[in-house]
């Protein structure tokens, strides 16, 4: 029996879709059977992040409306046979699917997959309610910015009101050099404010853009720090105890130079 | 920011003096904004709270249920629960057993 995990944030642009694609790919590479569902109807993007945009025939709305069988809409990634995508519809809107339909769909998928990972749209309206309807667990993505943390706080309240207790936090796009300079909130600042359990921290990494340009999730790049962070998050999801990666190694040349000159302890 | 300020800023950073870190400003602004956000409780919760308060108070005095108002007031830095409960008559002996 599989587990349904929704990835949400409230605010847009903080990396929900990238997180979904990378956690999904990492889990699949660890021999877990994974299906990713894009619930951002009208603004689908998970397909392009995964590089599967040319293979879509049917979508989520076709499945819930009975235009096709569930199997027909599932796209299997050729690079990882354990990874499957159920894409969102692009020409409909969020009201084309109901929370009840999502619950039924998740129950069906649980029979066949180990992990069902749902990419939630931004906002707190019907798209959000659809995305969380069938979920067993929730992950909240936030960046170290006032607006993102504020929206994450609101989302945590809504998740708990919907009986999705104990969501876990992913801090995305952390910049260790800025944290060191006192110009970015650090991990503890954010955990103190949101008061939820931390699942992982993903550093800002230019390789994310390079990998999305190519349609290859960054976890495939063994040299990328963000890729390593996502692989660690996937390991924690399947229950392994993995320490946080130290970001000290990320000191810029300038920082190291200052240390050598003795300007900083 | 003027160019001069930028250079001074850089200089103080190199010297390891963190004058006003923007992170602390962010934390303080978040704290205040969340006090407000979290104070927006549902009307249903307030209605239940009001019923419970009235139940307790009516053991001690006659009150005007219709004129009763329970609200959350928030200003810049704090949130307060404000109840306005018109009293009709105060009982000579509190009938706690009525509860």
Image (cartoon, rainbow, N blue to C red):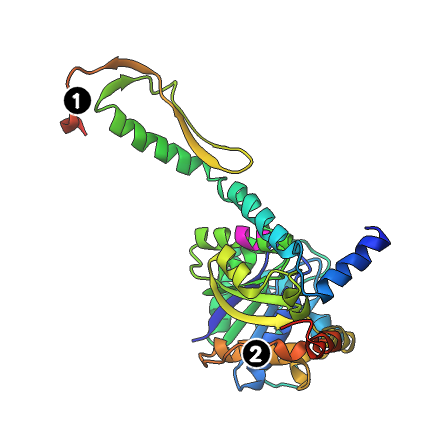
Quarter the N terminus of chain A occupies: bottom left
Q: Is residue A159 magenta?
A: no
Number of residues whose C-alpha sits closer than 10 Å to that of mark 2, classed few (under 14), some (14–19) or many (20 or more)? some
Identify the image quadrant of residue A223.
Answer: bottom right
User: As rendered, which of A180 and A229 lies closer to the eye?
Assistant: A180
Judged from the image, the secondary structure of the residue bearing numbered disc 2 is loop
Label disc, if present, on residue A113 of the rendered structure: none
Visible residue check, residue A74: no
The image quarter containing residue B84 is: top left
Give the magenta-colored segment's residue range. Answer: A150-154
Q: Are marks 2 and 1 in contact (CB under 8 Å)?
A: no
Image coords of residue A56 (percent x, y)? 71, 72
**Residue A35 location, x and y as percent?**
57, 75
Label 2 vs label 1, nearer the camera: 2
Question: Label 1 neighbourhood size at 10 Å, few (<14), some (14-19), many (20+)?
Answer: few
Residue A219 x/y as whole percent: 64, 81
Asked if residue B72 shows in the view, the reply is: yes
**In front of the other: A265 or A218:** A265
| Nearer to me, B57 or B43 | B57
Name the image quarter holding residue B45.
Answer: top left
Which residue is at a point 81% across and 50% down the rendered structure image?
B1
Residue highlighted by disc 2 = A245
In terms of secondary structure, what is the magenta stretch mainly? helix
The image shows residue A5, relative to residue B66, as above or below, that is below
Q: Is residue A153 magenta?
A: yes
How far apart marks 2 and 1 lie (CA) works out to: 64 Å
Q: Relative to residue A146, is residue A243 drawn left or right?
A: left
Q: From the image, which quarter does the C terminus of chain A lie in? A: bottom right
Please name the residue shown 63% across and 58% down the image: A121
User: Which structural element holds mark 1?
Assistant: loop
Residue labelled with disc 1 = B94
Name the chain letter of the residue that bears numbered label 1.
B
């Amino acid at each position: 029996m599989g587990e349904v995990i929704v990835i949400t944030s409230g605010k847009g642009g903080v990396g929900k879709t990238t997180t979904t694609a990378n956690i999904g790919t990492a889990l699949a590479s660890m021999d877990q059977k994974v299906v990713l569902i894009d619930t951002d109807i009208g603004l689908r993007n998970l397909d392009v992040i995964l590089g599967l945009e040319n293979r879509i025939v049917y979508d989520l709305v076709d499945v819930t409306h009975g235009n096709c069988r569930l199997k027909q809409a599932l796209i299997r990634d050729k690079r990882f046979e354990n990874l499957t995508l159920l894409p969102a519809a692009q020409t409909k809107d969020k009201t084309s699917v109901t929370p009840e339909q999502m619950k039924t769909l998740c129950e069906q998928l649980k029979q066949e997959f180990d992990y069902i990972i749902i990419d939630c749209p931004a906002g707190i309206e019907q798209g959000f309610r659809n995305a969380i309807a069938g979920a067993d667990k929730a992950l909240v993505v936030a960046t170290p910015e006032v607006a993102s943390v504020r929206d994450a706080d609101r989302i945590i309240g809504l998740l708990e009101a919907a009986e999705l207790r104990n969501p876990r936090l992913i801090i995305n796009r952390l910049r260790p050099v800025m944290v060191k300079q006192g110009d970015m909130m650090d991990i503890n600042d954010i955990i103190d404010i949101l008061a939820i359990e931390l699942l992982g921290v993903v550093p800002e990494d230019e390789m994310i853009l390079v990998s999305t340009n190519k349609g290859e999730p960054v976890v495939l790049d063994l040299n990328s720090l963000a890729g390593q962070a996502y692989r660690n998050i996937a390991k924690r999801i399947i229950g392994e105890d993995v320490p946080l990666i130290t970001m000290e190694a990320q000191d810029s040349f300038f920082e190291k130079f200052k240390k050598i000159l003795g300007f900083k302890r | 920011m003027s160019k001069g300020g930028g250079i001074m800023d850089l200089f103080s950073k190199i010297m390891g003096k963190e004058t006003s870190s923007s992170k602390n400003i962010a934390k303080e602004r978040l704290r205040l904004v969340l006090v407000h956000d979290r104070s927006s409780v549902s009307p249903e919760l307030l209605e239940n709270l009001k019923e419970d308060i009235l139940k307790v108070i009516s053991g001690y005095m006659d009150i005007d249920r219709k004129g009763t108002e329970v609200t959350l007031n928030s200003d810049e830095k704090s949130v307060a629960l404000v109840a306005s409960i018109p009293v009709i008559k105060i009982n000579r002996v509190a009938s706690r057993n009525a509860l």
